[in-house]
Image: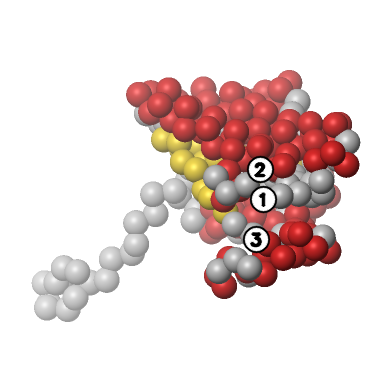
Amino acid sequence: MPDSPGGRRIRRAPARPLRGRTAVVTGAARGIGEALAHSLSHAGMRVALLGREKAALQRAAESLPGPSICVECDITDRTALAEAARRVAAELGPADVVVANAGIAVSGPFDRTSGELWQRVIDVNLIGSANTARAFLPQLTATRGYFLQIASTAAFGAAPMMSAYCASKAGAESFALALRGEAEPDGVQVGIAYLHWTGTDMLTGIDDHPVLAALRRNQPRPARR
């Protein structure tokens, strides 16, 4: 901390490298996505909230301190995501940060889970993440930005009764690692966040299944939150 001419020390304001830049968060209507949108907005970013629940997206956007837009879209729909990317660039400026957060989960024995439901988890968590990257990668290349893949400890620690979720998150991790090697030469950073059990709507009722309840009880204390 430097001294002023009169000998008094001057406290400098902390650097705000994100201020005035644009962030995109998928699955932003609630839970982790909504919390990330708040954090990025408080850091001074313009935030685009993407998701399927229009009313919830609007409520989340109205609570942000800075500029934002809501875009209702399904990340498994490449055409809708391309239009979302166009709107973000036109209304907030090209994306500097993109968080591929949208995800769903289903629990239960593999042989009792419908093929359609199992496939939907893969489509949202893995294919949807790749679709998100595809839609916004041109903007991130232009801004030399950052793509964050929200993964899970399920990517490397498979749990019974959650085969679709574990497979999808392992795939999302591998996708992000491969993308990192391709995108970094163009100045785009790619990160992966490994989240564990997190108190969101996705976990509602998960302890009702005895196998999953026992799994959580026998984990180290920090992981049982």
Task: Give the alpha-carbon distance from disc 1 to disc 3, as whole Å.
Answer: 15 Å
**Who's the residue at 43% across and 30% down the image?**
180
- Image coords of residue 185 (percent x, y): 35, 24
Quarter of the C terminus within the rendering? bottom right
Instruction: Answer with left or right where residue 101 lies relative to residue 123.
Output: left
Instruction: Answer with left or right where residue 107 lies relative to residue 219.
Output: right
Please tell me whether mark 1 sits on a helix, a strand or a loop.
Answer: loop
Question: Which circle's residue, 1 or 2, is located before the other in the chain?
Answer: 1
**Who's the residue at 11% across and 78% down the image?**
7
Task: Give the alpha-carbon distance from disc 2 to disc 3, as whole Å.
Answer: 15 Å
Instruction: Answer with left or right where residue 19 lies relative to residue 62.
Output: left
For residue 94, above or below residue 206: above
Q: Which residue is mark 1?
A: 159
State yes or no: discs 1 and 3 in contact (Cβ < 8 Å). Answer: no
> Residue 166: which numbered mark, if any?
2
State yes or no: discs 2 and 3 in contact (Cβ < 8 Å). Answer: no
Camera-nearest label, 1 or 3: 1
Question: Which circle's residue, 2 or 3, is located before the other in the chain?
Answer: 2
Quadrant in which residue 114 is drawn: top right
Camera-nearest label, 1 or 2: 1
Badge 2 density bin: few <14, some 14–19, many ≥20, Cα 10 Å: many
Badge 3 density bin: few <14, some 14–19, many ≥20, Cα 10 Å: few
Residue 21 appears in the rendering: yes
State yes or no: discs 1 and 2 in contact (Cβ < 8 Å). Answer: yes
- Image coords of residue 75 (percent x, y): 72, 32
What amino acid is at disc 2? Cys
What amino acid is at disc 1? Ala
Q: Nearer the viewer, residue 115 or 54?
A: 115
Task: Give the alpha-carbon distance from disc 1 to disc 2, as whole Å.
Answer: 7 Å
